Amino acid sequence: MAYTYIGVDLSKDWLDIYHPETGPDRVANRAPAIRAWLARLAPTELVVFEATSLCDGVILRCLDARRHVFHRLNPGHAWHFARSLNLPKTDRVDAKMLARLGAERSLPPSPAFEAARAELAELSGRHDQLKRMETQEKNRLKKTFSAAVRADIRDQLRGLARRIARIEAAIDTFLKDHPDLAAPLRLIESIPGVGRVTAVVLVALMPELGACDRRQIASLGGVAPRARESGKWRGRRFVGDGRRRVRQALYMAALSVIRSGHIAPDLVARMRAEARPGKVIAIAIARKLLTIANAVLRDGVPFREIAPPNPT
């Protein structure tokens, strides 16, 4: 299907819009205004905007309610495209740039927005925030000598522990109410070294699991090292693209797997014999875990019941 691409630059208060036929427009970043604007669009007019989690919640829900096509774009891709055109940085220019990017790349529609998965992602994100706050307070406690300050920090830690427990209970309740998300989570938890926190992150932030090949899923998860070569020069490979929170969760799970030796012990031993840095080994195991999770969801059976993934 041939689409007309509508660029939308998001901010807290406004949507700056560029339509290739009618030009620029602006509407409030509020549900009534967005619904009224979407009602004027044809089904073949595809909305392109960046994945900015602080600003795109309203438009995503409005698009989902109307079942209207859209493409939610990686902000890094938009940034590099704008740089290649040597464009100034304004909201109107960005909207026009997004429309042009969509047309030149023939961007396909993104998967439909899933409100339940988005809510699980919010619960998981809040759990992460509270755990970071707990770690910060524990670090402060180690450096504090004042009895009054130490008592206050301990009070804060007790309060944080209660709040973390409430969020974890809310996640458990949510999963009981949404068996379509609980089922893949149980399959992922069957993988040794992958606990509840990592499994929730994968289910919430990786809807593509089970539907992509191993290279695609590694790239999306941010655990695929990028080559850096020019002529005879061969630079070190780094990870950095992809979904950062997914990579962080897999990295922590990989550390547990390396200690236990339940998955790919031969790979770990070989990389250690080659004097590979510990972080490189951890990323390799993180990629292995993501590949296994992808296979588990693809086949719909727990880890111990499937054949190990093809190393090639």
Image (cartoon, helix red, strand yellow):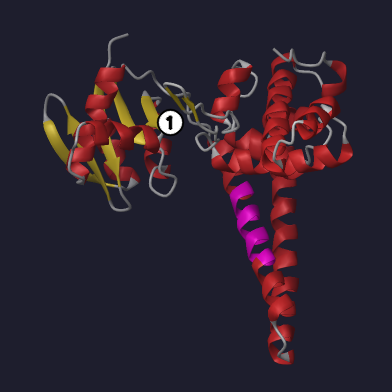
Q: Position of residue 309 (x, y in %)?
A: 75, 16
Given residues 147 and 156, the one toward you in this image is 147
Can residue 54 be seen from the camera position used here? Answer: yes
Q: Please determine whether, in this image, residue 309 is positioned above or below residue 246.
A: above
Given residues 287 and 192, the one toward you in this image is 287
Res 247 quadrant in image: top right
* Residue at 75% over, 17% down: 300
Given residues 26 and 158, the one toward you in this image is 158
* Number of marks in the rendered image: 1
Image quarter in which the C terminus is found = top right
* Residue at 65% over, 33% down: 203
Does 133 appear in magenta? yes
The residue range painted magenta reads 124-135
Q: Position of residue 241 (x, y in %)?
A: 50, 35
Q: Is residue 276 left or right of residue 192?
A: left
Look at label 1 and name its amino acid.
Asp
Q: Residue under circle 1?
A: 64
